[in-house]
Amino acid sequence: MEERKSNKTVWIVLGALVAFLFMCGVSAVVGGVAGYAAASRIVQHRMICPEEIGPIPRIPDRDMPQPWIPDAPFGRGGLGAMVVEVIEDSPADRAGLKVGDVIWEVDGMPITEVDELADLIGSYEPGDMVDLLIMRRESIRNFSVELGRHPDRGGETAYLGITYRTINDWPRMRDWDED
């Protein structure tokens, strides 16, 4: 009699386990079907009434042209360093440089493919004054900057305090196709 009760308990536990697994499978299928139906209704509604939802974001092409940068001063072509970040309380910040400024020269020496901005600044000592020729929007400006000590290089290297992107003969706006 005792053995029958033990077998009955095992069958009840197995039955409960099978029922639990069956319900998990059914709920996964039902949830997947419901999610598919909801997503297809949203897509269908967006196709019929896009003005209610707004424009679909456009993913830029990989070969999309870069922003327009005017020719450098004195007809030198499009070589320079575009400021993409000015470190707070750095020499560049104190001098008034801003994101989007394009640095063309350091003390009269043009930025070229060979002499990048980092190389030109690295040829000075901390505390030296340098004159930067900068284009901001449509105007050419001169900035005098006292170089600081680089915080990550032991204070022996001159520091301007910007992050930049070298620009090299980017296409001009007149060469682009307008949509």
Image: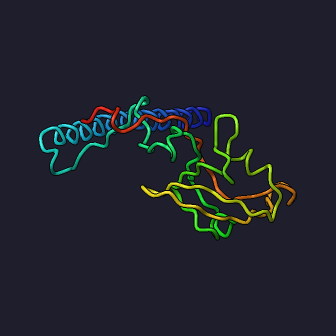
Q: Residue at x 56, y 40 (%)?
A: 79
Name the quadrant of the N terminus: top right
Point out residue 46 in the picture as x, y percentages from the top left corner. 19, 42
For residue 38, above or below residue 146: above
In x, y percent, where is residue 23?
Answer: 40, 37
How many labels were placed on the picture? 0
In the rendered image, the residue lying farthest to the front is: 74
Q: Quadrant of residue 64?
A: top left
Q: Is residue 37 above or below residue 91?
A: above
State how the image is colored.
rainbow
Side (left or right) of 63 relative to 97 = left
Residue at left offset 43%, top offset 34%: 171
Residue located at (58% from left, 63% from top): 97
**Along the line of sight, which residue is nearer the eye, 18 or 160?**
160
Q: Residue at x 82, y 61 (%)?
A: 126
Give coordinates of residue 12: x percent, y percent.
50, 37
Residue 53 is left or right of residue 15, and the answer is: left
Q: Quadrant of residue 66?
A: top left
Foreground residue among 82 and 109: 109
In the rendering, at what x and y percent does residue 149 appear?
Answer: 80, 62
Q: Nearer the viewer, residue 99 or 43?
A: 99
Quarter of the image with the C terminus is top left
